[in-house]
Amino acid sequence: MRTYLLNTLLILFLTSCSLTPKSSDEHKRAPNSGAVTVLELQQSGPLRLLQVLQANAGSGLMVEKSDIRFWGEAEINELKSFVDDPSPAAPVYRSTSGVLCTGPKFASTVGHEAKHLIAAIKKGIYPLSQCSTYDLKLSE
Amino acid sequence: MRFLMLLALVVFGSEGFALEVAKHGGRLFVTEACDQGGGVLRSLAAWSAKAQTGKKCNMLARGESMMDAKSCRYDITDCVPDHVVQYQGANPKLDGPNCWNLSLVMSKILPNLRYSTPEEMNFYMRPPLCRQLKDGEAREPGDVGAIREVSQGGTTETHGFIYISEKLAYSKNGMSRKSPYALQTLENVYDVYDVPQQAVCRKNEINVASAKCNQAVAYFRCDSMESYLSKTKNVPADIKKAYNDINAVDACMEKSAFSGQALSNEAQKNVLETSQALLTYLEKSKSSPEIAKIPKEEREFILGSLQLRLAAIADQMQAIAMGTQSVPTYESSLELSALSEAIHDASKNIAGGK
């Protein structure tokens, strides 16, 4: 648990502002850098986004609710090879998310985020839900 | 500049209904189309009366005609609940305070602004404090709207807001520090949270018919926690003390979230000690006649609410730790989270009651 904590906080001390990498550390995103925009998504592509999510494991990534119809079958095929990847990754959340989509409770994996991206590409909207790992089912 | 708008929010509904809320000079103004005839003012007046604010809305006030001669502006400072005057357009400095918490605070179920978990929202939207309105039953200002994701596996809390009228709502759209508290059109709330326009998705009840909606809204009418506790007898002194101590902790969370300052060591120590004391009491009380005297449903509600409050406070502490980059606060949040789980287990093991 201590390792997880230190990893999480290490991310917060690191700085980066863009999804576009210039060196290996720059996949990490600063906590005050705001939501990822549709333009950033379009420029980076889904695989680079997965790298960012992996680099930010322990945290969460805020993404503007975006029309992503510029991605299609080619991107889905690329993502398919990652759906079984159990490596830790950050979940994604919309700026309107009520849940605190970060930390151990909402931890994600590369595989889960790849599946979320595939489902999102099929529907043309990303993120598909308020928080990609929020899966609490409450019976009426 | 005297008339510089410090904060303004303009929200358009799907039928062209526009609303602008702005603060300047310490006063709060709402601007709507003059041909609406002060409809917003009437809705706010009804909300204020229902909330027993003691404030009087001047219904004879004529809207001040704006530059375009089509918009009328009303001073609503002395009309709306104090919470709106204080927080309209305001953002916390740290992530956490969210939509569910606003709904619970405005319903006088929780005392302070902080993160509320979806479990906490779902717990309170049931009896004894809240009841779901029946389909066709008239909604009233101050009712709580709960937008829920509907799937085959059940429902998931998506959003909570305060209903003012069929055109107006009071909401904080998200736990992000970038999301302000805001009066806005009801249509905007539905739009942000993807509630389809079909009537079946916007009824008072979510049921089998809502299955096609993905996101649907349900409405609830709630009683305050103070009112409930005043009617509840035989609450042991240790439980009452835990309530008061958690109220104090909640106040610390609000202060930190809105100032952006780290939690003091004293506050962290207090919340852990409060939780430990409650856990020790519950473990000792497994079969004590004192706690068994409380009817089972009341006991489950009281202990459930304490446990869920501590769990939500643990999450808020985590957000404070992230925002202030404090390792000790993060460690305390994990410790508190574990304690709240232990309290949950200990509550289940209590025997007796009817």
Image (spheres, rainbow, N blue to C red):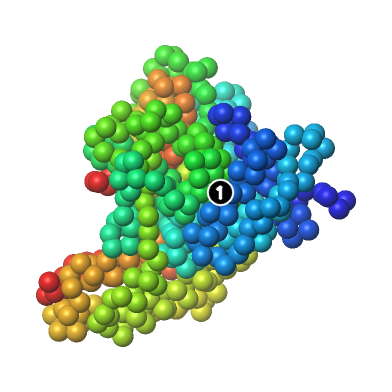
Q: Secondary structure at mark 1?
A: helix
Number of numbered discs on residues? 1
B71 to A1, vertically: above or below = above
**Which residue is identified by label 1?**
B43
x 68%, y 53%: residue: B60
The reply, left or right, for residue B2 in relation to residue B219 is: right
Q: Nearer the viewer, residue B248 or B21?
A: B21
The reply, left or right, for residue B348 in relation to residue A48 is: left
Chain for numbered disc 1: B
x 74%, y 60%: residue: B26
Q: Amino acid at mark 1?
A: Ser
**Residue B44 visible in this rendered orientation of the protein:** yes
**x and y percent of residue B28 in the render?**
70, 55
The reply, left or right, for residue B319 in relation to residue A87 is: right
Residue at far top of view:
A73
**Residue A8 visible in this rendered orientation of the protein:** no
**x and y percent of residue B304 in the render?**
28, 65
Check the picture and name the quadrant holding the C terminus of chain B.
Answer: bottom left
